[in-house]
Amino acid sequence: MAMSFQGSVKDSTRARADAVRMFVSNARYAEPFTAADLSEVRLLVDRVNVGIASVSLAHATVAVGAETVWHCLENTDEIYFVLSGSGLVFVGSETRAVGSGDTVWIPAGVPQKIRNLGRDPLVFLCACGPAYAPECDKRKVRP
């Protein structure tokens, strides 16, 4: 005996997708601010401009000759994707050289900083999960 169901998962997903408006942002137009780690940040997708709590994306810049302060994000993983420039990233007791195209995962709660070693700004995307919240950003002493 065949069973019949009204609607389907596919129909439910389509209805939910149709109800959500797409959001597009551009780093050139996002308002820059100095983050707790002293980098310049432009929020692209986050709790403030979209209301998303599961993930956020920001555009970050570390000036020539500068570095961020030791800090960690409590209960929040971070992923850096380097767009341009070169530097050193410090995660816990590890240090690695990074440059354009490199991706770095920083586990939640692990002290970190990044230093610009190049002649140009060090520019990277920073994804956080769950979405970045200022209260999770804590300054730390060197691990």
Image (cartoon, grey):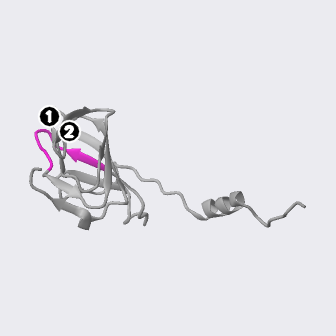
Decide which of 129, 32 is in the foreground and name it: 129
* Quadrant (top left/top right/bottom left/bottom right) for the N terminus: bottom right
Residue at 26% x, 32% y: name it.
99
Which is more foreground, mark 1 or mark 2? Answer: 1
Give residue 52's quadrant in the image: bottom left
How packed mark 1 is, by other alpha carbons closer than 10 Å (few <14, some 14-19, many 20 or more), is many
| Residue position marked by numbered label 1 in the rendering | 117
Q: Main secondary structure of the magenta part?
A: loop
**Three-letter amino acid code at disc 1?**
Leu
The segment highlighted magenta reads 59-68
Q: CA distance from mark 1 to mark 2?
A: 9 Å
Residue 58 visible (yes or no): yes
Q: Is-magenta flag for residue 63?
A: yes
Tell me the number on the disc at residue 130. Answer: none
Look at the picture and state if 15 lies above or below 59: below
Tell me the number on the disc at residue 121. Answer: 2
Look at the picture and state if 143 lies above or below 101: below
Task: Kindly state the secondary structure of the residue where label 2 is placed.
Answer: loop
Q: Is-magenta flag for residue 125?
A: no
**Three-letter amino acid code at disc 2?**
Pro
Residue 62 place in picture, x, y as percent = 19, 44
Residue 6 place in picture, x, y as percent = 79, 67
Give residue 72's quadrant in the image: bottom left
Decide which of 140, 29 is in the foreground and name it: 140
Residue at 24% x, 34% y: name it.
98
